[in-house]
Image: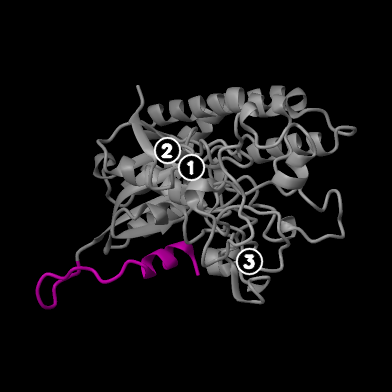
Amino acid sequence: MSAITAGLMGLGPSTAYGAGAASAPVPTAVSLGDSYISGEAGRWQGNTMVSSYGDAYGTDRAAYSCWFEYEWCDHDPERVYGSSYANGCDRSDVAEIISSRIEESRVNLACSGATTYNVTRAVDGGGPDKRKGEEPQADQLATLAGHSDVAIKLVVVSIGGNDIDFGDLLEDCGYAFVFPFIYDKCEETRAARLEKSLDILPARVLKALDSVRAAMRSRGYKDGSYRLILQSYPSPLPPADAYRYGETDSRLTQGGCPFYDSDTTWAIDTVMPELTAKLRSAAAYAKAEFLDLSHAFDGHEVCSRHDRQAESGNTLAKPVPAAQAEWVRFAPFAGPVLNPYKPSPADQGNDQEPLHPNAYGQEALGDCLRKMWNATPGSYSCSGSADHGPQDMVLKPLS
């Protein structure tokens, strides 16, 4: 089933005006882009280091038919990702656009791993994601916009992270911590290459946004008839002085956050601000609104001393409270690196999920989007805070 078909099936009955009258178009919000908006890692509600055979102390939403006090369960990721699990797009049931609860219909066309090339229409120089077998997302948007019973009111885009290989950068940082005798710290090896990627990123993002505009125009939509929002990325890691664990093996074996303080500081103080600035400039050129999510997970990052993992007593029926939980899926280096014969949470799930917003994180991003939707069009920042849940996000105008 395609993302468009799934979205249209969720439209519900349209309002008819009189017997035999044509149904009124359903107001629709659409998300495009990469894993941070497709809903990757939405399978998880918090983290834990408990063995993976059961519901993982209530963190694994793919677990079902549990017995023996939730220690043994069946697992089916399609309960969370639906048919998109088959090709790895991983559009979860709590993805940002779904959690936002804005408009009558919400369609998620985003796909994990997407770059600006995969968003841009083929006629504009983009192309399909050959690994996932899906057409360019702007072409899918044009198809959706061509349906007479659909009235698109919002298009929200998250893109650019894969263009600069941000996931690979974080992986390099993790390997530098786990295997210091083989790998140098990632700032030492990635800074120059990253700078070059960031320099060309605004042009790529602008091309993708222009292609989205063109797709909408091709179906008769004027630029002012809907809102176009480009968003940035939340930091998955806490500031170096806010780690729950010292710069020891505990970050690997207990937290799933194997990163040096210096690499963490570089990522938060240099990489994230530069990436956000590049995206904001692209939004400005495209005359799109901008949503800065840099601080959306404040107090809820993986391994933050302000949150905690799920514990014994937490179950699917009684999960770790969102206000106390980590909103980011931990890194996959934990457990098997030191003991490859002992099952661990790293064996549960897939290798695309780490350091992505989990179910709580997706709900928080949905709250940001809903609050921006209800605000006057413009550019905003959205932030979270410790001891507050996903529905307590704070939206502020950007100067």
Extreme residue in the right direction = 181
Q: Answer few, some or many: residues within 10 Å of disc 3's Cα (few below 14, many 20 plus, some between 14 and 19).
A: many
Of badges 1 and 3, the one in the foreground is: 3
Mark 3 near mark 2, Cβ–Cβ under 8 Å?
no
Q: Which mark is residue 379?
A: none
Prevailing secondary structure class for the magenta stretch in the rendered image: loop
44 above or below 168?
below
138 sits left or right of 164 in the view: left
On the image, the x and y values in percent for residue 3 come to: 47, 62
Disc 1 secondary structure class: strand
How far, Cα to Cα, is label 2 from label 1? 6 Å
On the image, the x and y values in percent for residue 121 come to: 47, 47
How far, Cα to Cα, is label 1 from label 3? 31 Å
Mark 2 near mark 1, Cβ–Cβ under 8 Å?
yes
209 sits left or right of 317 in the view: left
- Give the residue number, with chain letter if any, for mark 3: 55
Disc 3 secondary structure class: loop
**The quadrant where residue 396 appears:** top left
Tell me the kind of residue under disc 1: Ser
Extreme residue in the left direction = 18
- Name the residue located 60 percent from the left edge and 69 percent from the top edge: 63
Residues rendered magenta in the picture: 1-23
- Name the residue located 27 percent from the left edge and 64 percent from the top edge: 149
Tell me the kind of residue under disc 2: Leu
Q: Earlier in the sequence, mark 1 or mark 3?
A: 3
Q: Is residue 10 magenta?
A: yes
Q: Which mark is residue 158?
A: 1
Disc 2 secondary structure class: strand
